[in-house]
Each structure stands twice: as structure tokens, then as C-alpha cells.
Image: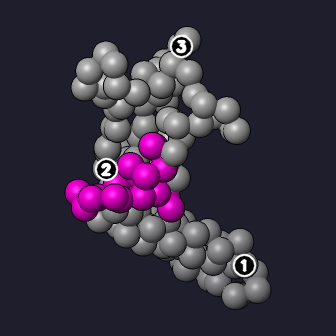
Amino acid sequence: MDARLVVLGVTQPYSRESDNLAEVSAKAILETRGSTPRLYRNTLVFLAADKTRMQDLDEAARKYLAWQSILNEQTNLNLSPYHVTQAETQKSAAEGAVTARLPETWQWLLVPVQSTPQSL
């Protein structure tokens, strides 16, 4: 009976196109709960990522992971202290970019509506 937030994954982004993956997934979740019909459909709210912003977040996450990998393998790469400091600075900048892009990416709130009391 409580309201619930469903965060849709990166494979279900929202776009203004008809039949986008976020709306299709939200409708499927609203229809059933496992193998039974869902009761209290009006208690679910869906948060979806923006399809166009997803690419920016993906790029920022890849940069962060790349710098993290460099720092993890600094002895194998024979990095000088200067290069280690530079890699740490770049990693911090990439982490800040990921943190900033998360709320920009997950910006769509999908709320089910019922046009008439008789409709499902």
C-alpha cells in the first residue's frame, strides 16, 4: 500500500519517441507482479534515464574506470611519482564528472495515470 520508486536500468532509457524502452518496461511492471496481476498500480513511480544523456554518463564512467585501472597497475606500468599524482588528479576529475552526470541522466519520472475510474 506504500508508494514505491522503481529505478529503471540503463538498458531501459526514456526518449520522446513512441514505444520507448522505459515506457514499455514500466507498463510491463504495472501489469503483473511475477505471474499474478498487480494490485495498487497507482503506488508505483518509475525513474528512467534520458537516452541522449546516457552516452555522456557512459563516457565519464569509462574514463573513471580507465584512470582507476592505471592506478591499480602503477607498479606494472612503472609510473613515476609525478605520473601517479597526475593519474590521481584525472581520476578525481572523472569521478566528479560521473557524480555530476548521474542526476542529469536519471531525470524522467514516469507516473501512471487513470483517465477514468472505470479504466484499468
- Residue at 47%, 20% in the rendered image: 43
Q: Residue 104 at what x, y percent from top left? A: 31, 50
The kind of residue on which mark 1 rests is: Glu
- In the displayed structure, would residue 78 be above or below residue 86? below
Observer-side mark, 1 or 3, equals: 3
Magenta part of the chain: 10-27
Q: Which mark is residue 73?
A: 1
Of the numbered discs 2 and 3, the one sitting upstream in the chain is 3
Q: Secondary structure at mark 1?
A: loop
The kind of residue on which mark 2 rests is: Glu
- Residue at 42%, 22% in the rendered image: 42
Q: Secondary structure at mark 3?
A: loop
Q: Is residue 1 left or right of residue 51?
A: right
**Residue 87 counted in the magenta span:** no
| Predominant SS along the magenta part | loop
Q: Is residue 6 left or right of residue 34?
A: left
Q: Which mark is residue 104?
A: 2
- Residue at 46%, 43% in the rendered image: 26
Quarter-wise, where is residue 77 in the image? Answer: bottom right
